[in-house]
Image: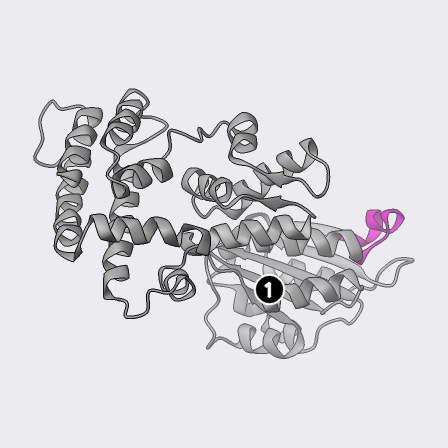
Amino acid sequence: MNEIDAILADIRKKVFKPIYVLMGDEPYYIDLITTEIKKHALKEEERGFNEMVFYARDTNVDEVVSSAKRFPMMAERQLIIVKEAQDWSRTIDGLSVYAANPQPSTVLVINYKYKTLDKRKAFYKAVSKSGAVIESKSLYENKVAHWIHDYLKQQQYDIVPKAAQMLVEFLGNDLSKIANELEKLGLLFPKGHQITPDDVETNIGISKDFNVFELRNAIGNRDVSRAYKIAEHFGHNPKEHPLVLTVGMLFSYFAQILQYHALTDHSPRSVASALGINPYFVKDYTLAAKNYPMKYASRNISLLREYDVKSKGVGVREIYDGDLLRELVHRLMH
């Protein structure tokens, strides 16, 4: 993240590298850096003659090199963007000679999504010396809530921890989708507003009462009535709450409870760090650990493995996902 922040800061100051290779399995930062370069590299009136966008499948390395070597027209620089460059995985090393001695007045941006370059190849080594290679990695889900908070802080907003967790439960670690939803919220509220679970429910359509986060809490608190009610809602809305995903989230939850039991330091800061959670939620895990001693947490891990197989249709006949979930919830708490 620090490397990406530094690159973005330079771009906004109009300090450019001659070549950027943006690669990795998280497209959000690849798109963000590309957008910022487009925004700052050229003035609007310079774009017509000095900005070119290629798609790798429709062109070749030689054509891009030829374009990169030409001089800008009535501008300080020209911008060339190659999208979907992962389609060049077998030929991209052909750019290595140009990368070793790039045209100073050209900014060449290579989007290499969902893959990474072989660091042993000549092209990677050349770009590492003359330009910038940025690897955009997917965040682990336990880091996404913190990312949401930081993103909103930069936009001069705040968010209630539960609201952030609702977004994580609903959208996973897809940063592009999350950023899109946060932008929508930003259009609705003034700067300085603290986004609440009600805001998320009303404007994004995620129920603050019927989601996996609330189901985990109900089970952790041994609130049988609420857990059954949420399981019933999930059973009637299987498309919104797929059983296989619900089981996976519950598995992660009980794995964290087991991890809690293994800790020697149960101070809030230590627990939050070890479990990768917001300190706000430590009290919930402390209660869940009391309700599920290590023996029962281990048993529940085994149960969840069993139902993970069943949720994928193995060993079950003519039984609805809703019925399986209700059965699972009952067994987890008894």
**Placement of 305 over or under 225, stated as above or below:** below
Query: Which portion, as a residue range, is magenta?
Result: 41-51
Quarter in which the C terminus is drawn? top left
The residue at the point 63 percent across, 34 percent down is 184
Crowding at dot 1, Cα within 10 Å, few <14 / some 14-19 / many 20+, comes out as many
Residue 84 visible in rendering: no
214 in magenta: no
Quarter in which the N terminus is drawn? bottom right
From the top left corner, tell me how far across and down residue 67 is, in percent: 73, 60
Q: Is residue 311 left or right of residue 181?
A: left
Q: Is residue 262 left or right of residue 4?
A: left
From the top left corner, tell me how far across and down residue 71 is, in percent: 83, 64
Closest to the observer: 268 or 181? 268
Closest to the observer: 216 or 235? 216
The residue at the point 61 percent across, 64 percent down is 4
The residue at the point 82 percent across, 62 percent down is 77
**Placement of 331 over or under 126, stated as above or below:** above
Closest to the observer: 38 or 51? 38
Q: Is residue 118 left or right of residue 226?
A: right
Give the quarter of the image for residue 13.
bottom right
From the top left corner, tell me how far across and down residue 140 is, in percent: 41, 56
Question: Does the magenta stretch mainly form a helix, a strand or a loop?
Answer: helix
Residue 104 visible in rendering: yes
Q: Identify residue type, mark 1.
A: Val
Give the secondary structure at mark 1: strand
The residue at the point 48 percent across, 67 percent down is 117
**Residue indicated by mark 1:** 21
